[in-house]
Image (tube, rainbow, N blue to C red):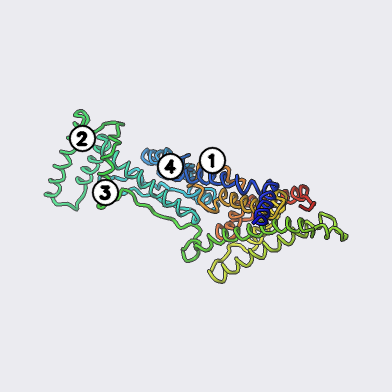
C-alpha cells in the first residue's frame, strides 16, 4: 500500500511541477466554463445580450411607407442594417459572406392597401450557410408587417385614407352590381364618418398617435392571420446552379469538416514534437549534419503534407460520394495550401508552450476549440454576444472556412480570395518563425 501511495504522490508532484499541465488541469476548466457561459448566455437574453444579424436593405420603392418599414428594421436591436442602393450589390455582399441576408423592398410597396387585403411584398435572400439566422430574419420582418397592419388600423388618418381609396375603387369598378355598390358605399361611408369622429371621442388615435402598443393588438393580428397574411415573402436562392438549386448541405458542411481534420493534424504534430524532444529524438537528430532549422522544417513539412492529404481525402469523398462540385479547382487548391500553411505555423507555436505531452495536448486542443468557437465553426456568430463579431477576426478558423467556401460554392474570384488566403499565409509564416525561435530544445 505504501508503494501505491508513493507512486501516486510522485505523479502529483510531477503535475505540480508542470505549470502548464497544472493550469490546464485545474484552472482552464473554470475559464472554459465562464467563456461558454458568456457565449450561451447571449442566446437566451439572460446575460450579456445577443449579437446582431448583419443584413442589407434595398429600398426600391422610395416612399414614406418603405422608409418607415426600413427604419423599423433598423430600430430592432437584433439586426444590424446596412442600406444599399441596388440589389446587385446587396446580393454580392451576401454571396461573399460579408452579410447574412438582404431584404429588397420592391416598387409598389407604399401603394399596397392593407385595408383591401393586399399583402406587403418583400424579396429576401439568405446566405446558404446561415439558414438558422434566415429563419430569425423572416420571423422579424413578419412581426414588423403585423405591427404596420395594427398601426394602420389604429391610426384614424391612415384608416380614413384607405377607406376613401376603397370608395374611389368601388365608384370606378364595373364588376359590382348597383346593389353591391350601394351596400359597400353605405358601410364605408359610415366607417369614414366614424373614423373622422373617433379621435375626438378618444376611441382610436389620430395623426401620428399610432394607437395602443399594448397586448391586445397582438391578439387581433394573430386572430386574423388565418384569413389574411399581411406580408408575402419571395425567397431568392442565392448561388443557384443550372437546375436552380443552391449549394447542397454537403458543400456547406465539408469545409468545416476539413478544418476539424486539419486542426487534429496540427494538434497531433505539436504533441509529437514535444514527445520527440523529451525522449531525446531531437537531440540524436542534431548529432547528424543538420541544423536546428532543418529539423523543424522537416517536422513542419510532414505536418503540411499530412494536412494536405487529409483535405484532399475529404474533398474526394465530398465529390465522389456526395456530388459536391467545387466552383474553382485552382482556387480551392490555393485555399487548401493557405490553410495548411496557417496550421503548420500554429502547430509550431503551440509546441513551445508545453513542456510535457499532456500539457501540449491540453493547450493545443484548448486553443483549437477556442478558435473554432470564435470563428463560427461550432455556433453561428449571430447567436453569440455582440462582442464576438469583431473578436472572431482573430480566428484562423473563420478565414479558413471562408477561403474554402469561396472556392467551393461562394463563387469567389481571385481578388476575393486574396484577403482570407493572405491572412492565413501570414499566420502560418509568422507562427512558424516565432515558434522556431522560442522552441526549447532541452529534454524535460
Looking at the image, which residue sits at the far front? 1
Q: Distance between the residues labelled 1 and 4?
A: 15 Å
Q: Which quadrant of the view contains residue 3? A: bottom right
Contact, mark 3 vs mark 2 (Cβ under 8 Å): no
Q: What element carries label 3?
A: loop
Residue 179 visible in the shown view: yes
- The numbered mark at residue 117 is 3
Contact, mark 1 vs mark 2 (Cβ under 8 Å): no
Q: Which of marks 1 and 3 is in front?
A: 1
Contact, mark 1 vs mark 3 (Cβ under 8 Å): no
Determine the residue positioned at 42% across, 49% down: 136
Whether 212 is drawn above or below 436: the answer is above
What crowding class fits label 3: few (fewer than 14 Cα within 10 Å), some (14-19), or many (20 or more)? Answer: few
Q: How far apart are marks 3 and 2 (CA)?
A: 19 Å
Determine the residue positioned at 27% across, 47% down: 222
Residue 424 visible in the shown view: no
Q: How far apart are marks 4 and 2 (CA)?
A: 40 Å
What crowding class fits label 4: few (fewer than 14 Cα within 10 Å), some (14-19), or many (20 or more)? Answer: few
> Along the line of sight, which residue is nearer the eye, 211 or 27?
27
> Along the line of sight, which residue is nearer the eye, 20 or 103?
20
> What residue is shown with label 2?
195
What crowding class fits label 1: few (fewer than 14 Cα within 10 Å), some (14-19), or many (20 or more)? Answer: some
> What residue is shown with label 1?
387
> What residue is shown with label 4?
45
The answer to whether 285 appears left or right of 378 in the picture is: right
Q: How far apart are marks 3 and 4 (CA)?
A: 36 Å
Amino acid at each position: 500500500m505504501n508503494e501505491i501511495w508513493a507512486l501516486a504522490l510522485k505523479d502529483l508532484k510531477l503535475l505540480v511541477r508542470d505549470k502548464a499541465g497544472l493550469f490546464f488541469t485545474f484552472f482552464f476548466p473554470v475559464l472554459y466554463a465562464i467563456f461558454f457561459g458568456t457565449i450561451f448566455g447571449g442566446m437566451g437574453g439572460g446575460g450579456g445580450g445577443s449579437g446582431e444579424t448583419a443584413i442589407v436593405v434595398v429600398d426600391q420603392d422610395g416612399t414614406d411607407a418603405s422608409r418607415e418599414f426600413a427604419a423599423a428594421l433598423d430600430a430592432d436591436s437584433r439586426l444590424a442594417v446596412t442600406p444599399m442602393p441596388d440589389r446587385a450589390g446587396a446580393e454580392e455582399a451576401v454571396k461573399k459572406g460579408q452579410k447574412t441576408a438582404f431584404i429588397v423592398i420592391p416598387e409598389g410597396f407604399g401603394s399596397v392597401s392593407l385595408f383591401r387585403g393586399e399583402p406587403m411584398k418583400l424579396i429576401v435572400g439568405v446566405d446558404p450557410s446561415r439558414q438558422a439566422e434566415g429563419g430569425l430574419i423572416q420571423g422579424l420582418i413578419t412581426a414588423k408587417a403585423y405591427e404596420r397592419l395594427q398601426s394602420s388600423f389604429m391610426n384614424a388618418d391612415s384608416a380614413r385614407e384607405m377607406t376613401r381609396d376603397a370608395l374611389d375603387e368601388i365608384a370606378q369598378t364595373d364588376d359590382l352590381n348597383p346593389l353591391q355598390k350601394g351596400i359597400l358605399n353605405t358601410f364605408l361611408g359610415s366607417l369614414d364618418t366614424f373614423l373622422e369622429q373617433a379621435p375626438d371621442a378618444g376611441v382610436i388615435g389620430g395623426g401620428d398617435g399610432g394607437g395602443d402598443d399594448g397586448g391586445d393588438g397582438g391578439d387581433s393580428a394573430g386572430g386574423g392571420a388565418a384569413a389574411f397574411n399581411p406580408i408575402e415573402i419571395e425567397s431568392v436562392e442565392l448561388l443557384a446552379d443550372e437546375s436552380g438549386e443552391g449549394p447542397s448541405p454537403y458543400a456547406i458542411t465539408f469545409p468545416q469538416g476539413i478544418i476539424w481534420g486539419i486542426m487534429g493534424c496540427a494538434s497531433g504534430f505539436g504533441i509529437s514534437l514535444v514527445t520527440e524532444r523529451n525522449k531525446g529524438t531531437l537531440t540524436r537528430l542534431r548529432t547528424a549534419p543538420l541544423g536546428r532549422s532543418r529539423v523543424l522544417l522537416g517536422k513542419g513539412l510532414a505536418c503540411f503534407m499530412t494536412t494536405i492529404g487529409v483535405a484532399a481525402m475529404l474533398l474526394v469523398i465530398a465529390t465522389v460520394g456526395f456530388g459536391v462540385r467545387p466552383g474553382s479547382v485552382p482556387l480551392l487548391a490555393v485555399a487548401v495550401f493557405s490553410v495548411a500553411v496557417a496550421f503548420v505555423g500554429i502547430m509550431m507555436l503551440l509546441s513551445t508552450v508545453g513542456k510535457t505531452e499532456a500539457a501540449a495536448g491540453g493547450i493545443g486542443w484548448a486553443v483549437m476549440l477556442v478558435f473554432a468557437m470564435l470563428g463560427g465553426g461550432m455556433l453561428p456568430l449571430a447567436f453569440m454576444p455582440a462582442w464576438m463579431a469583431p473578436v472572431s477576426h482573430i480566428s484562423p478558423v473563420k478565414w479558413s472556412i471562408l477561403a474554402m467556401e469561396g472556392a467551393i460554392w461562394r463563387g469567389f474570384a481571385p481578388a476575393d480570395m486574396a484577403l482570407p488566403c493572405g491572412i492565413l499565409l501570414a499566420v502560418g509564416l509568422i507562427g512558424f518563425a516565432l515558434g522556431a525561435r522560442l522552441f526549447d530544445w532541452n529534454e524535460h
